[in-house]
């Protein structure tokens, strides 16, 4: 039944997009690992890690497009779920360092030794196991989104008010994670990772594997989103987006639909954050910054709200532009370029409608 639903949800454009991602997921590691560095087709490990990061951003954009493009929930705090997933993975990576840290403590991470923590906090227990960490990557963002959505949607908070509350949520988390006594490294965050599942996180084969996993996660996220939006459930989501009061009057439990899709979206964002951290090599409270969440919304707007494919492509293109422009003389003007791009997209959308 699930396979039939997925098959019905994939049109030619979706299949072409998945085929393109599959080809990239195979070709990029091959060009990185099997070709000599002198070859004109050789791709450096820097390129692999960079586009692996872009694909994590694309998965985050899919998560936002699912709730904003198809259900009308504009979240300006999805960076919080992304960062929580990243911290869960970062805690696992920190527990793998062991005595190889600067202070050579077999259990406590370096920052805890520096801050004179007497013992490992209880909420760090279990993160030495990858399976537990992988569970928490999905569980923590999902629970937070469920609790937040339960109160927000039952109170029928919508529109700009909901957006402001989500922004306040991620700002509050950022302030908390900046504190040294919070137990997550303070403003320095978590870094200096060594291994993941016993493999050197800096080694080219590991980077290539992480890139392939990120690509697969993006493909899976895309398929899940397509299956949802093309189902009867997805039609109700669109009805909620276009006429929430009328949909509620017809007997649909609007709050339940919104709560489910919001929680699922948060879990997807957590997975994106978890894949992002080992490829970037650090996670700190700046990932909770409301500006990051707003920028993610811009990716979706640029690529095309309510298109899924466009949201993913928008994330990759905008972040590639950011990398290109911020590495040259235009670096101080990048935010102006990004803002102008968003205004142009919104103006074009208003003109078309």
Image (cartoon, grey):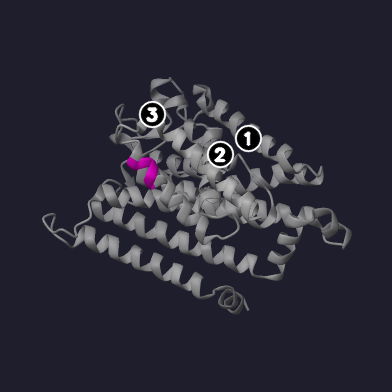
Residue 203 seen in render: no
Outermost residue, front side: 351
Q: Nearer the viewer, residue 109 or 345?
A: 345
Residue at left offset 39%, top offset 24% = 113
| SS class, disc 3 | helix
- Residue placed under numbered mark 3 in the picture: 332
Outermost residue, left side: 38
- Residue placed under numbered mark 1 in the picture: 167
| SS class, disc 1 | helix
CB within 8 Å, label 1 to label 2? yes
Pointer 3 local density, CA inside 10 Å: few below 14, some 14–19, many at least 20 = few
**Looking at the picture, how far across and down is residue 257, in whole percent?**
74, 57
- For the record, the magenta segment spans 320-324
**Looking at the picture, how far across and down is residue 263, in whole percent?**
65, 51
Which circle's residue, 3 or 2, is located before the other in the chain?
2
| SS class, disc 2 | helix
**Looking at the picture, how far across and down is residue 177, in whole percent?**
53, 29
The quadrant the N terminus occupies is: bottom right
Q: Nearer the viewer, residue 127 or 226?
A: 226
Q: Is residue 287 above or below residue 209?
A: above
Residue 212 seen in render: yes
CB within 8 Å, label 1 to label 3? no
Mark 1–mark 2 distance (CA, rounded to whole Å): 9 Å
Between marks 3 and 2 in the image, the one whose residue lies nearer the viewer: 3
Which circle's residue, 1 or 2, is located before the other in the chain?
1
Residue at left offset 52%, top offset 31% = 121
- Residue placed under numbered mark 2 in the picture: 294
Between marks 1 and 3 in the image, the one whose residue lies nearer the viewer: 3
The dot on residue 87 is none
Left or right: 254 as drawn, with respect to 334? right
Residue at left offset 46%, top offset 47% = 274
């Amino acid at each position: 039944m699930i396979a039939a639903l997925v098959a019905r949800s994939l049109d030619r454009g979706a299949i072409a997009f998945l085929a393109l991602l599959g080809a990239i997921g195979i070709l990029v590691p091959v060009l990185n690992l099997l070709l000599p560095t002198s070859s004109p087709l050789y791709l450096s490990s820097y390129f692999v890690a960079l586009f692996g990061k872009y694909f994590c951003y694309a998965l985050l954009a899919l998560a936002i497009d699912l709730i904003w493009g198809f259900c009308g929930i504009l979240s300006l705090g999805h960076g919080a779920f992304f960062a929580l997933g990243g911290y869960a993975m970062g805690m696992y990576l920190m527990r793998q360092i062991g005595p190889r840290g600067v202070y050579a403590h077999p259990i406590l991470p370096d920052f805890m030794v520096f801050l004179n923590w007497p013992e490992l906090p209880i909420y760090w227990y279990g993160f030495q196991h990858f399976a537990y960490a992988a569970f928490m990557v999905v569980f923590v963002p999902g629970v937070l989104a469920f609790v937040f959505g339960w109160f927000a949607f039952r109170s029928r908070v919508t529109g700009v008010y909901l957006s402001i509350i989500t922004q306040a949520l991620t700002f509050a988390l950022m302030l908390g994670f900046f504190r040294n006594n919070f137990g997550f490294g303070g403003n320095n965050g978590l870094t200096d990772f060594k291994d993941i599942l016993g493999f050197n996180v800096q080694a080219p084969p590991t980077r290539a594997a992480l890139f392939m996993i990120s690509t697969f996660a993006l493909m899976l996220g895309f398929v899940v989103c397509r299956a949802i939006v093309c189902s009867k459930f997805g039609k109700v989501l669109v009805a909620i987006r276009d006429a929430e009061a009328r949909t509620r009057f017809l007997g649909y439990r609007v709050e339940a639909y919104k709560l489910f899709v919001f929680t699922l979206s948060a879990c997807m964002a957590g997975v994106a954050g978890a894949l992002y951290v080992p490829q970037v090599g650090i996670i700190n409270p700046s990932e909770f910054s409301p500006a990051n969440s707003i920028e993610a919304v811009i990716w979706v707007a640029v690529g095309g709200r309510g298109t899924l494919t466009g949201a993913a492509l928008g994330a990759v293109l905008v972040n590639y532009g950011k990398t290109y422009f911020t590495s040259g003389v235009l670096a101080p003007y990048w935010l102006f370029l990004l803002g102008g791009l968003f205004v142009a997209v919104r103006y074009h959308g208003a003109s078309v409608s």
